[in-house]
Image (tube, rainbow, N blue to C red):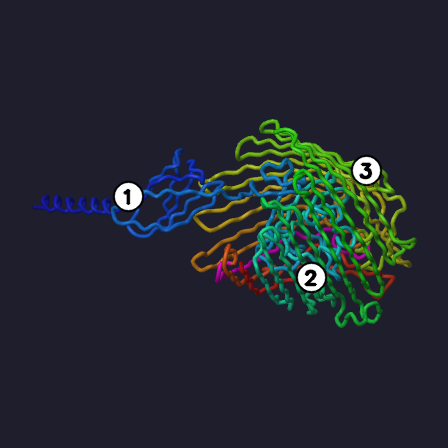
Amino acid sequence: MQFVRRIVLLSLLLAGVSGAAHAQAVLYGRVTDNAGEPIPSANLYVEETEQGIATQDDGTYRLSSLSAGTHTIVVSAVGFQAVEEQVNLEAGEEREWDVSLEPTVLRGEEVVVTGTMRETYVKDSPVKVQSVSSERLQRGSVTSNIMDVIGNVSGLSTQLNCGVCGTNAIRINGVEGPDTAVLIDGMPIQGALASVYGLNGISPSIIDRVEVIKGPQSTLYGTDALGGVVNIITKDPANTPTLSADVYGRSTQEFNADVAASAKGDRVKGFVSGNVLRMENFFDENGDNFADQVMRSRAALFGKGTVENADGGKILSVAGKGYYEDRTGGLPGFSDDIRGSDEIYGESIYTTRGELLAEFRPPGVEQLRFKGATTYHDQDSFYGGTGYKATQTNSFLQSTWNQQLTDAVRLLGGGTLRYQTYDDDSPVTSGGAKKRFIPGVFAQAKWLPGALTLLGGLRVDYHDESGFVSAPRLAAKYDASDRTTLRASVGTGFRFVNVFTEDHQSLTGTSEVVFADDLDPERSRSLTANLEHILPLGGNPMTLSLDGFYTRFANKIEPAYEINNNAPNRVIYANNDSEATTRGFTAGLEQSFTAIPLSYDASFTFIDAFIEDDEGTRALDYSPDFLGNLGATYQLRDLGLELDYSANLVGPKRMPDLYVEGYGRDRESPTFSTHDLKLTKSFLDVNSPSGVGVDAYLSVENVFDTTQPTPLVGDPYDAEEGFETIYTWGPIVGRTFSLGVRMNLR
């Protein structure tokens, strides 16, 4: 009897299992591209069950054992846009579901222009170019100033050059700020005065992306490109919303508003953007009695228009920018009303700047392009009781001819003209305004013998004091496979001295500034190498990269600090007889996941920067031993939330002798890190191609309240003791909170 019962129970169980199996659904089909070609190794993922499968070589797949009901299926493949769709299955149903994927823009498929002076995919460029979107730059933080977030790019950092007036400079792989050429839409208009205060007036709201090349790039871009190039690409009117606004406030009582509008015709498109910033709150958390953050008010206006031909190609692009800024720093009670007096020490800088940029592509002559820009920069400032007024004009013209000779050979040739005037009220220009006319020619050849790409170039400029200066370059790229790329380059760079760039930091103190009469241009020679490999990882591609760099500087213009007991200290700028070296490597990775809405990128840069002279070898001042960057984005789609995180790690820096020997400060700064978080709530998709989008965001910058002690030494009222403002190695402002809202109308 017991045996019979067991037989009956077993039969019932088998029947139930069979019924359940019959009740389960099957989804099968084929994954193809938009041309109907199969996509092998595409990944299909069922969110509810975490079940996944990859397609066969013919693009087919079969998902079995699916329960009845609605399933969210995500289909992804390397090089294609992911598709997410809900599929409702009946019990026992076998449904055919074919999917077509559209190509996407991967990192290697982004278009860049900086490396070769023409539109080129990242993967095809023989010169390593790092392209970073404006949104990615600001991941985790909120700012009105690109200089606050440029350190989120691997190998880049910002150096605070004035603890009172709040200026800073960009460093690439530890190289000083003046050795980095900063371009706007490919044009070098940020020199001298603008390199100190002009960069702080560039709002991220007008930026489409930033392209970075590490290593000398004078072959194409001339002076200042000893250590690398940072090219700021402004937004294209064709891709801007009809109306947009971004408004935020910070716990430091800073208020910022960006408003932009665009109009698009069949062949004419344009947009205009306005920015207003105000921060008038005095606070002193480090207890040195000086404002921790410079107080400032700024108004800026940017406009850009394009004209297209009948085929949609751009013929003309014109952009203009103007801004006025009033920045104040110093002791409590200082205001513009007493600027220049000895009553209360403070620093007050009025900056007025105008820029006009244009690019013309003659119709029917696609090989020829013309670029031009002109700028006016006026500075009216007081550093304590020392007044400093200066004006600068900068004009730039460039023509290029880009010719495809054969399928494997392309030539680029061009000429440039730079005209600069500089006038101030210092002894440096006592004989009248400094005028500089620099003509130059350059040529470049690109050859593609199979998987190998070779790029060679030469530039020759003429300077009235230095004569002819040349800058050759040779680069090579080898595609070892579809996912592995090797690059290497050798090149040279040069830089003519910019008066204000060199002496600004000393103007903010009480030291006397002296320039040698026979300053020669700085020169650099560099070798770089890069390995890049993409791992598919089942539809979650990971990009691994390894960069090595070696740069040797000659005629280095170095400040020599003379410390006197009974006379003003002097800072003497002269060519260093010794040579400086910067070498190291960067390791990085980048990945986006399909199964979870997470993307991240991370990098670590080791830097060995030093100067060799008769007294031995010493580290380069302010150059960090290493840099680390981490950024991540996680989306909670059901709640319409996005969480952004960024972190920066900065290694120890050698501090100048002046502070160690004259004021007893530490020789080496400590290692530190900063962390930023931003939470964004999407009420309406702000990136939607049509309709209205509304976001609100909350950010916490410098989460762990990391700050350095006072960057100031000495007494501004004691001429004998002296007063200096740039013992700077880390953040001065601690934890801050920002709250804002963003709106787009397409």
Which residue: 61% across, 66% down?
249
Q: Are marks 3 and 2 in contact (CB under 8 Å)?
A: no
Residue 403 lies, in percent from the top left, at 67, 34
Q: Are marks 1 and 2 in contact (CB under 8 Å)?
A: no
One can see residue 40 in this view: no
- Please give the range of residues in magenta: 662-685
One can see residue 223 in this view: yes
Quadrant assignment, res 294: bottom right
Residue 142 lies, in percent from the top left, at 60, 59
Q: How far apart in space, not on screen, are marks 3 and 2 (Cα)?
A: 37 Å
Instruction: Decide: few, some or many residues near mark 2? Use Cα within 10 Å; few <14, some 14-19, many ≥20.
Output: many
Q: Nearer the viewer, residue 321 or 516?
A: 321
Which tag, 3 or 2, sits closer to the chain's start? 2
Amino acid found under the numbered disc labelled 2: Ala
Disc 2: which residue: 300
Q: Secondary structure at mark 1?
A: strand
Disc 1: which residue: 94
- Identify the mark at residue 469; answer none if there is no mark: 3
Amino acid found under the numbered disc labelled 3: Val
Q: Residue furthest left?
A: 1
Amino acid found under the numbered disc labelled 1: Glu
